[in-house]
Amino acid sequence: MFTAEKRVSILRVLLIALNSVVYLWFMDQTYTYNELAFSIVVVANIYAVSTFFFEPYRKVKLLRSIYFTIVADGVLSMLWIIATGYMDSPFYLVWYVSLISIAFRYSLKHTITTTFIYLVLYMLVFALDPYSTIELSDLMVRLGYIPLAGMLGMYVSLEITDQIDGKVKIIQGEVALKKAHHELELKVKERTSELQVMNKDLTDSINYAERIQSAIFPKMEDITSTFQDAFVIHLPKDIVSGDFYWFHHKDGISHIAVVDCTGHGVPGAMMSMIGNNLLNRAIVEHQLNDPGKILKDMDRSLEEMLKDDAEGLAVNDGMDLSLCMIDHSRNTLEFAAAQSSALIIQGGELRQLQGSKFSIGGFGSSGDKMFKTTSISFNPSDLMYMFSDGYQDQFGGNKGKKFYKKNLIHLIESGSDKTMKQQELTILETFVNWKGNEMQMDDVTVMGIRL
């Protein structure tokens, strides 16, 4: 509301008015210098009122100077002290208070200058006092109070300044921390937004890839129209899968396979496309029928495709699969597998068909691998099952353990008297209950057909 100069002027008016009242009403009137005292009172009030109303500080550069204020207020205080009893006046304490105030507000240079001016004025009062009975030693003590007041003011000012600086630094640190936190939040939001866009684009691409992959899978109608009944459970771990199943029927002969490629997700899906092409080339283009020879052809072709890369690093990706060739006119079944197996149930008795210990691709040279073909006869309504290792390797249950292959075999065998649809529901429900809240570990494929 008021400038600093205006507030000083208001304080000066109040102090002089108070001192005037104190002097006029309470001071002893026996002194012989009453006229001088009254004159000083009048001059002091005129000075105070004029500085309040006319504010010369704003008009004259000299009058705005701190040194003018120090000298003017010091002389005013000196005259007031003379008017109220010289060295016996109680108002000489105003100098101490004024000096402490100067030390609080201004620099060391201003404090030293004010101390010197007040020392001179104090000595002048002592020299002018006609009634002085103060000894020199007492005078020196009183003089020592003036620089002491300045020192006290500077000390308190420095302490307050240090505390204020400390708090300012803390506040600045908090402000800087809040600013950094705000900037970090903005960056996180920006990056999150970018990642959301990237994730959406990536998810859209993978969903499109899933539609392409699903298009190469055989239609379930083609399988069920060839066999009495069948089911396929296919559960990708991610959107796209490294597992796939394959079917081809021509001239009374069917080839059917369940394939588990290295990895899952996008890498597994890319390998599944390669595996699908290898089966098409071996069976459809090259017209191979023997499962063992088909696997050998696939392994040789995959080895040729996945040669060492430009840096000489070996590519050891491959696939495990079970492959059956079924001659419907002769009721015979030929089976071969790469690091996999199949189950056949004939007359209520379960038999496990074992395949080769080698995978298609992967480690080892194609020339060292052998894929044996097993031939059996079957009767109508016999059952055959093929599956990847995703079902048996799933963690779950009360103890978080694997399901294991033996439990899958037992589950299939115990439900073999049911329809294929009932078996599919039982196998699927068992898997879901076993997995519970656990993460799915791998792609899962289980196929069952009634021959």
Image (tube, grey):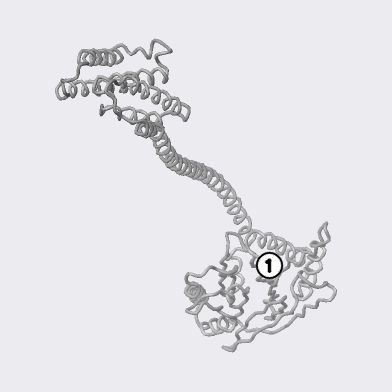
Q: Position of residue 410 (x, y in %)?
A: 55, 84
Outermost residue toward the right in this view: 367
Quadrant in which the N terminus is drawn = top left
Q: Residue at x 79, y 62 (%)?
A: 306
Across and down, in percent, residue 197 comes to 55, 45
Query: Is residue 332 left or right of 47 when viewed as pictured?
Result: right
Q: Is residue 242 left or right of residue 371?
A: left
- When asked about the image quadrant of residue 289, the answer is bottom right
Amino acid type, callout 1: Cys
Relative depth, front residue between 277 and 7: 7
The answer to which image quadrant residue 137 occupies is top left
10 Å crowding of disc 1: few (<14), some (14-19), many (20+): many
| In this view, 328 is above or below 133 | below
**Which percent across, then down, holds residue 60?**
40, 10
| Residue at image point 19% right, 22% down | 23
Instruction: Choose top left, top right, bottom left or bottom right for residue 105.
Output: top left
**Coordinates of residue 417 in the picture (x, y in percent):** 51, 83
Quadrant for the C terminus, please: bottom right
Q: Secondary structure at mark 1?
A: strand
Q: Is residue 120 left or right of residue 130?
A: right
Disc 1 target residue: 261
Q: Judge by depth and name the residue closer to the eye, 142 or 224.
A: 142
Asked if 397 appears above or below 157 in the picture, the reply is below
